[in-house]
Image: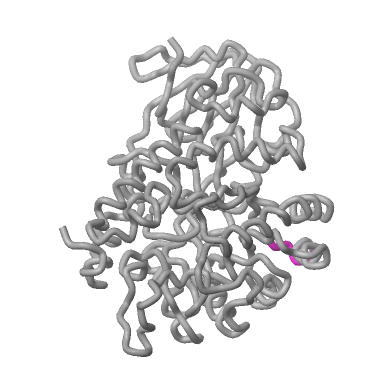
Amino acid sequence: MKSFRSLRPAVFIALVLTLPLGAQTPRPAVVLFNNVRIFDGQGATLSAPSHVLVRGNTIEKISPLPIPTDKRGDTLIIDGAGRTLMPGLIDNHVHLFMAGSSQAEMMDPKATFASLEATGAEQARLMLLRGFTAARDAGGPVFGIKRAIDRGTNVGPRIYPSGAMISQTSGHGDFRLPNDRSRRFGGQMTAGEFMGIGFIADGRDEVLTATRENLRAGASQIKVMAGGGAASAYDPLDVAQYTLDEITAAVQAADDWGTYVTVHAYTPKAVRRAVEAGVKCIEHGQLLDEPTIELLADKGIWLSLQALDEAPATAPDSTRVKKHLVVEGTDNAFKWAKQHHVKLAWGTDLMFLPAQMPNQNTDILKLQAWMTPAEALKLVTHDNAQLLALSGPRNPYPGRLGVVEEGALADLLLVDGDPLTNLNLIADPAKNFVVIMKDGKIYKNTLP
């Protein structure tokens, strides 16, 4: 098997276009949840004891009265025994391809696209078994993983892919090694670009091409690096990236396909430039001042926030200093976003640290610093689903997500207990999520 450095663009294109994007997993016939109390994704209390009928991949009926159904061999009746039925969890900022490997493992010359994709696919399987039935991938070559899940070959959440992250030279997505020269000055396409992790694009024309390449491959939204990063080597945290014209080019190309651009940005300068360019979502934003957060509210722009951890002690000093500033700014960002009624989304942004991936669930508990359990659960179900729907005609899974309502898609969790009074239940999915359903198909059922 060839290493990444020996791959050519034609090979990458073949990997991306092998399978049809719209393939779906087979649907079961009927599942009836009897005697459940429902968190519908929006309310502050559970319903009275109810019965929920799922036919195919859709919630067909919700009733306080027993629902008659044929007791055929293809009908499954689940006795909820008063447990909580709620929407599947949604993580709006993942990097699945990079979730299962460290940076050293990804840069190993022996690594192949197939081997790294396999680790990402395994992380997708584990993510679904943690109760995450949908995830917005904020950058990386996940098209193959997504197709395998959609056709039923692999197990995982619904994936909303961004494709390769688009970065300027010396931007947050410039993953070149110190001795890698620019393509414009005697260098070659980098391993990261061959993999489809990121495109280094400078100037309006290159940004347009990078955006259109991602849309051609099946991106549901576009990710652009508009400011400095904590974990990247070449860009200080405070810098703004891309000119107004360059970001506008990405926005226009995405809008022509009926979808949107989200940007990595922390600072007021970077965010305000992105807002002027027409961007519809900001990733991070922990270093924003209150007037800029008010601007997001006034413009109806989404803020996709994370409650991140400090950098590990093994990280370079520069990374630890930058990450500390981000962590330190998180409290104000959440408080001001709530105070000014910003459209708020949530994600984890975990990558390169496979051992930390199970923290995806415990990260939800951090939200209790700013929210009630009901507000936190609404954020990670209903509200996150509204951001997914922003992809419009590029939405790979049309239908309502993040709610338990008649006509909605059947992405459901049966929880052993009441997470509205004890949010800690969410942190132990192996024990407390007794049924996990995605698209009407059961992937876990520990009930007798």
Whether residue 95 is visible, yes or no, is: yes
Q: What percent of the width, then of the height, locates residue 97?
A: 38, 53
Quarter of the image with the C terminus is top left
Query: Given the current orientation, which residue lies at the most extreme bottom position?
Result: 185
Residue located 54% across and 21% down the image: 432
How was the colour assigned to the protein in this rendering? one colour
Quarter of the image with the N terminus is bottom left
Q: In this view of the protein, which residue sits in the foreground, 185 or 79?
A: 185
Number of numbered discs overlaid on the protein picture: 0
Query: Given the current orientation, which residue lies at the most extreme left position?
Result: 1
Q: In this view of the protein, which residue sits in the foreground, 407 or 307?
A: 307
> Is 21 placed above or below 367 here?
below
Q: What percent of the width, then of the height, locates residue 294?
A: 81, 63
- Name the quadrant containing residue 87: top right
Residue located 32% across and 88% down the image: 186
Taking the magenta stretch, the answer to whether it contains residue 236 is no
Residue located 70% across and 59% down the image: 286
From the viewer's perspective, tell me whether residue 182 is left or right of residue 220: left
- Name the quadrant containing residue 198: bottom left
Q: In this view of the protein, which residue sits in the foreground, 165 or 392?
A: 165
From the viewer's perspective, tell me whether residue 268 is left or right of residue 187: right
Q: What percent of the width, then of the height, locates residue 376?
A: 69, 38
Give, as a single range, the part of the protein colored magenta: 298-302
Residue located 38% across and 55% down the image: 142
From the viewer's perspective, tell me whether residue 423 is left or right of residue 446: right
Q: What percent of the width, then of the height, locates residue 220?
A: 47, 60
